[in-house]
Amino acid sequence: MNRRHIVSAAVVCLAAALPARATTLRCPPDSVKVGNACIDTYEASVWRIDPANAALVRKVQTGRATLADLTAGGATLVSSSACNLPAFPINFPANGNWTPVPGSNPPSPGVYAVSVPGAQPSRCITWFQANQACLLSGKRLLTNREWQGAAAGTSDTADDGSTTCVTNSVGPAETGSRPGCRSAWGAFDMVGNVSEWVGDWADRAVSCANWPASLGTDLSCFGGPGTTGNPGEDSFTLSLPGALNRGGSSSDSTDAGVFMVDSGGNPAVKSPAIGFRCAR
């Protein structure tokens, strides 16, 4: 082997050893690049879209759909106010075991998670439904580690009702409407608004505590098994795993923040305080 071949082989080996994804990853318009992942810029809003509208579905799955595209295409926002108003369709039940719309190809229940500004984030959604809504849009739930990374730099100042994170209001604001609630990576509303399901599960929380002042005194409900302090829960319920949700909701005040973590709810719970966000 001559010198040129040796050098060429060395270059090939070095290129193979480099983390190519980290340097070549390009995120679609609905997300921001955080390390080696594309994190949705906005909390998920869930939309009913006729799978026959292939062009709109494709826009959603490639991260190019806008709010105008959704409304013009006849899409319907679901579970954006009080629990199940408007409701998820009956073929997209709380356990996530959806059935396809007749004739849909590829099979789909006609429900998709979208990252767009100016929409109410969907809530009253179980972990199982959130997981499926992300998958149907060609995405997934964030891991707990990814969520923590993407939230970095989000302001934890008091809710001023217009620019800062929604942590002391009667309900969530429209996605992206609080310009001061943006992480260093560019993701909006990671503190407050709705607490967000992530992919990880853990033992249900024994009790809650607060992080030290150096970490914002955010709430931590983690570790188990034991009692969450919620009335009416029996030992069977408490033996179920808890799906983590992060960040805090619109009514969590000083408990909300980038370190707020809660494993107190089983994955089948529906809460007007819990929504989700997707990633690629």
Image (tube, helix red, strand yellow):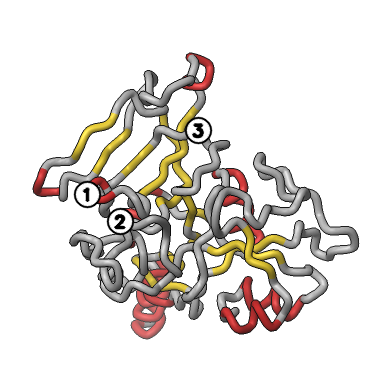
Residue sitting at 42 percent across and 75 percent down? 12
Which residue is the extreme one toward the front? 170
Looking at the image, tell me whether mark 1 or mark 2 is earlier in sequence order. Answer: 2
Residue sitting at 60 percent across and 75 percent down? 62
Which residue type carries mark 1?
Answer: Thr
- For the residues marked 1 and 2, what is the alpha-carbon distance in whole angstroms? 8 Å
Which residue is the extreme one toward the right? 103
Label 1: few (<14), some or many (≥20) within 10 Å?
some
Residue 167, numbered circle: 2
Residue 30 point in image, percent of width and height: 49, 75
Taking the image as shown, residue 279 lies to the left or right of residue 103, namely: left
Given residues 5 and 102, the one toward you in this image is 102
Say if 97 sits above or below 75 in the image. above
Given residues 81 and 261, the one toward you in this image is 81
- Residue at the spot of label 3: 266
Residue 254, numbered circle: 1
Label 3: few (<14), some or many (≥20) within 10 Å?
many
Looking at the image, tell me whether mark 2 or mark 3 is earlier in sequence order. Answer: 2
Callouts 1 and 2 close, C-beta under 8 Å: yes
Given residues 99 and 193, the one toward you in this image is 193
Which residue type carries mark 2?
Answer: Thr
Residue 70 point in image, percent of width and height: 65, 77
- For the residues marked 2 and 3, what is the alpha-carbon distance in whole angstroms? 23 Å
Number of numbered labels in the structure image: 3
